[in-house]
Amino acid sequence: MSSSQASWWPLTVAALTFITLVGCDVPTGNSSPSINTDTEISTPLVQEKTFTFLGGPNSEFDPLIDTTSSDFDSLFEVESSNNDISVVQEIDNFDIGNLNGALDNATGALTFDQKSFERELIDLQEEEGIAFPGEQRIGNLNVELQRSATANIPVRGSNRVAFDKAQDNYVELGPTTIEVQNITSSPTAPGGVFDSLRFTYPDIRVEPYGEDNQLVVDFVENPCGSGPCGSNGEYERDISTLGDGFRIDLKGARIYPVKPNIDENGTVTFKIGGQVNPDLTVKDGDKISFGASTSFDNFEIREIDVDEAKPFTVAVTPNENGGDINVANENEVRTAAFDGFEGITDRVDGLKLADVSLTFQVETANLASTDAQVYAAIQGTNETNQIYLRGTEDQNMSRGADRNVSSLPFSAAFTENGSPLPNDSLIKLGVGLRGASLGETERRSLVVDGDNSNVADFVNALPTEVRLAGQAEINTDGGGLQVRKPIALDANFSLDVPLRIRDRFVVRDTIDADLSDLNDLTDPEEDANISTAELQFSYTNGLPLGADAKMVIVDAAGSVIETFNGGFDNDNFRIEPAAKDEDGAAAAPSSGTFVFTLGSTQEDLRALADGDKIRLALNMDQAGSGGVTATVARLRADDQLTLNRVRLEADASVQTGN
């Protein structure tokens, strides 16, 4: 190219460019470009959070139920060898107390009458001319001076008991005294009619109650003392005070009446015998006689051993007016607490146990050779509900432990504020005491389970207070009976069963969850096409229970933003249970994933971006739990549920500019 060409060529190009620009339309206004951007959010909220079923604040993993809290520290018990859980509750403070009235009810109005008698010991006119071996003279007559007479003290006032002499049945006395008074003798003589006189009660024995330990009182010239000081335990009194009679404390003595039939009166034998004074001044027509009365003062029975006794009733709990028993009257019930159920609903809703049974421990003292049937109204209450422990016929036919009350054997009825309680709201607890011994405390365990009661419903109502009102029928078969004061009956019952879940229950937990990353998709200045926005949960479940999950997202102030699966009715939000072994315990864990879809528009996500926490509720159940058995789930303290991951995932195409 020449030098002249080099000079005009740039000018030519510039001119052509100018012409081209002048011939085109040039845009005016906003000149920013429109940009589409793919946005992904993948934020881990929880990285492997493990729950154990039970535990405390020092547990390695967060417990679903904190057993160290005041709500549960007395409810669950864990076996150290295998971590099996038992639900344990015990009521041992009913404080029923003594049943001393039972003895009066058993014997009725049993008493021993005062016996007054007068006996003619010698009729001198009739004795004349009759020869006696070893006879001595009174006046001008030869007569036998050793004389005796017998009388019977009536046993009256009881058509309730019978005594078998061959069985040595007896009545043991409390602080009772026997008196002989109103003593008369004739003829009147300065030296007295008798040199000695003996009162013998062959049917009254003192310790040690052998046949030779009869009550004997001798009036003699030189008595040995005031107590039983004779060679065979006789009491001795001065013959010169015969006219004053005697009074002796019979506490602890036993009377062996002759009363073989319940509906007949009986007797106790009383004998007198003595040596007539040979120096007695008499006339041929005189009669030597003796009179007295004998009685029991402050008569009290403290023990009986009878061959037959009619069934009788005794109040187990106070009965103020002796009529109907009002369960609502604080003065007619005994109350106790189920402490472990207090406040349980703070963390767990609807916990219901399977295979529930209560063990009643009935303690009696000084009731023997008999039986007792306790009829009771047992009411469980909590803040909102009440339920009665109802007995039923035993479905376990081989056991025959019926607890149903078809009718009451006494006239009193159970009521609640004046309204009669139906018999099917009551329960009967029978105690056999045929092998019991007086002086010993007998303990009998009675099982109340699903075969003979509604105990599962009662316990699963989670009562915090239990009210007991009751009466007992004693000696229902009318056979032999032994009773001694003080008579005691007490009852406690305990719940100690493996933690087996019958139905559903809900546990709750709150996890931190900052959802502010959603703000990247909710800018009102940008147009977002959201393809995915979800919370992903992956889990490993070592509980023999499955769960439907509910999720509530709340903001930093705790206000609810949105609830997902509020009715637990979407099967997509499901944790599958672990497989179970033959005993219902977890054998192999399950694993899986469930996803909560948060929304598909910016409007859906805008409020959720303020989310600060997730309240997770797990509706635990046994649906889908299989393995080798269909047995109800048995939980162990170290059973675990692990949330392997909770992640916020979102995909969107965000367009910026125009």
Image: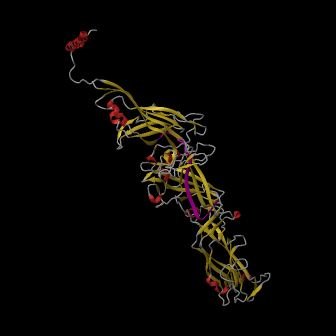
Q: Quadrant of residue 249?
A: bottom right
Residue at (60, 40) in percent of width and height:
583
Left or right position of 43 against 29: right
Q: Main secondary structure of the magenta part?
A: strand
Using the image as rendered, state which of residue 290 and residue 175 is in the foreground: 175
Residue at (62, 43) in percent of width and height:
397
Is any part of residue 92 visible from this angle? yes
Indicate whether 304 appears above or below 241: above
Counting from the top left corner in percent of width and height, residue 330 is at: 44, 58
Indicate whether 357 appears above or below 589: below
Counting from the top left corner in percent of width and height, residue 506 is at: 46, 41
Residue reaching furthest to the front = 3
Which residue range is magenta in the image?
480-506
Counting from the top left corner in percent of width and height, residue 466 is at: 48, 53
The image's colour scheme reads secondary structure
Q: Quadrant of residue 438?
A: bottom right
Using the image as rendered, state which of residue 337 and residue 141 is in the foreground: 337
Using the image as rendered, state which of residue 544 and residue 370 is in the foreground: 544
Residue reaching furthest to the right = 133
Counting from the top left corner in percent of width and height, residue 620 is at: 49, 39
